[in-house]
Image (cartoon, rainbow, N blue to C red):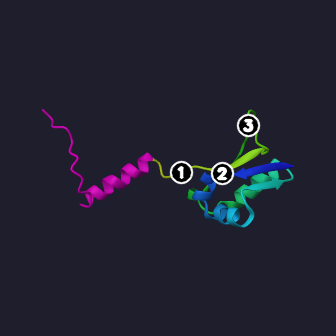
Amino acid sequence: MFVVEIKPSARKRNPNVGRLVNKSGTTHTFESRSVAERWAAALISSARTRVWIQSAHPADRSDVDAYLLSRNTRGKLEAAYDKRRRRLRGGDTSAQKGLPID
């Protein structure tokens, strides 16, 4: 048996995982890791909802073998792009200015 716990990152980023947690809870048991990985792949509906199976650390004392995880795909560079785009469109009213050039 291969036990997988769904972490909050996966639940928050992937709506399919969120619905699954509401329906069946956060811990799921599979025949093997490969079956768990196929299950995780089936939960992905777009690049923004990517989830994967990661083995639990050997020192982890919980009863799980692995975790279903996700990552925030909206990184700092994307946020910077959005800020620049708003400013170019005239929508950024921040008072921050650049340093004067001598």
Q: Quadrant of residue 90?
A: bottom left
- Which is nearer the N-term, disc 2 or disc 3? 2
Query: In the drawing, what numbered circle is on residue 60?
Result: 3
Label 1 to label 2: alpha-carbon separation: 13 Å
Around disc 1, counting alpha carbons within 10 Å, would you say few (fewer than 14), some (14 to 19), or many (20 or more)?
few
> Residue drawn 56% across and 57% down?
48
29 relative position to 13: left or right: right
User: Three-letter amino acid code at disc 1?
Assistant: Asn
> Residue drawn 76% across and 50% down?
4
Front disc: 3 or 1: 3
Label 2 to label 3: alpha-carbon separation: 14 Å
- The residue labelled by disc 1 is 72
Around disc 2, counting alpha carbons within 10 Å, would you say few (fewer than 14), some (14 to 19), or many (20 or more)?
some
Around disc 3, counting alpha carbons within 10 Å, would you say few (fewer than 14), some (14 to 19), or many (20 or more)?
few
Front disc: 1 or 2: 2
Asked whether the residues under the numbered discs 3 and 1 touch, taking CB atoms below 8 Å apart as contact, a structural biologist would say: no
User: Three-letter amino acid code at disc 2?
Assistant: Lys
Q: Which residues are magenta?
A: 76-102
SS for dot 1 = loop
What is the x, y in percent for residue 45? 63, 63
SS for dot 3 = loop
SS for dot 2 = loop
- The residue labelled by disc 2 is 7
